[in-house]
Image (spheres, rainbow, N blue to C red):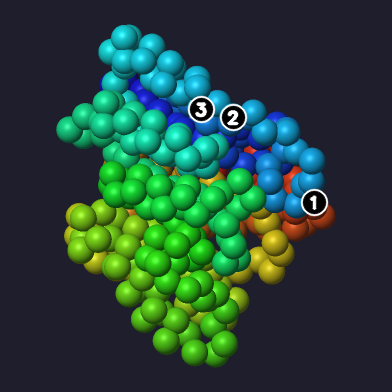
Amino acid sequence: MPTPRAAVIHDLSGFGRCSLTEVIPILSVMGVQCCPLPTAFLSTHTGGFEGFTFLDMTEELPRAAAHWKSLDLKFQAIYSGFLGSERQIDIVADFIRDFRGPDTLVVVDPVMGDDGRAYQTYTPAMCAGMARLAELADVITPNLTEAAFLLGRDYEPCSGGGDFQRHEARLREMAEALSQNGKRSVALTGASLREGQTGAMCFDARTGRTEAVQAEFVAHPLHGTGDIFASVLTGGLMRGNSLEEAAGRAVEFIHDCAVRTVAQGLSLQEGVDFEPLLGELAR
């Protein structure tokens, strides 16, 4: 059986583990050929750094896509993340329409912000465009901030405050609302249902079920966990796992990486120390 192939539309940061420096090794070790289509090159990621460089790859994207089209490339998955400009949203939407086959899995990680705020390079127009792009997805993986943007709601952190029953009901309602009446699957990250735990609330469009996956919370701010989650989830789905199974594996892997990262005493800027644990995903 040929190795499954994924077109991965993300940025590339030279330092600080995130986006393509996480996606490529994770999908590769999970048995997927990763074909990157970089949206931007940054000297570092944007979390906690000042003065980073930013090379916009907007003009190159349609040229690369046209070349791939001339080669008649087929993809079993298309997976998009951080986009570098408003125009890129329409380019990625066109890419999905051009390369999507009957069995192609489309995963959109609607990267826009965190902690209730949009990222430095994201404008309101880009956030609105990301919502349109997400309409083409089979699966979306927003965090709580991005979910609020997509739903047009005020951001509410999932801190618990002792009333986890209310938070669970809210998260279930959000995941189901994000599904657009069951048209797409949703893995809502940053969902905490118990004291000392965090994970994802998942709505599976194939079954119509909403289930939560949880792991022990590591009380330390970490950069790049969203990209790890979406990458492991995509790899799991390409292996034939259910949404709940794939999300559960992603949550467990992030937990193990977080424990190792905290033990190493690494700074937030370096991201999650995941490389020594990649073997866990090969099994």
Indicate the secondary structure of the residue bearing disc 1. loop
Circles 2 and 3, Cβ within 8 Å, touching? The answer is yes
Observer-nearest residue: 205 or 257?
Answer: 205
Q: Which residue is mark 2?
A: 56
**Above/below status of 185 relative to 31:** below
Circle 1 Cα neighbour tier, 10 Å, few/some/many (<14 / 14–19 / ≥20): some
Residue 16 lies in quadrant: top right
For the residues labelled 2 and 1, the Cα–Cα distance comes to 29 Å
Residue corresponding to mark 3 = 58
Question: For the residue labelled by badge 2, is the local secondary structure a helix, a strand or a loop?
Answer: strand
- Alpha-carbon span between mark 3 and mark 1: 33 Å
| Amino acid type for the residue under numbered disc 2 | Asp
Residue sticking out furthest to the top: 71
Q: Earlier in the sequence, mark 2 or mark 1?
A: 2
Indicate the position of residue 35 as horizontal and vertical percent values. Answer: 45, 24
Q: Which residue is mark 1?
A: 266
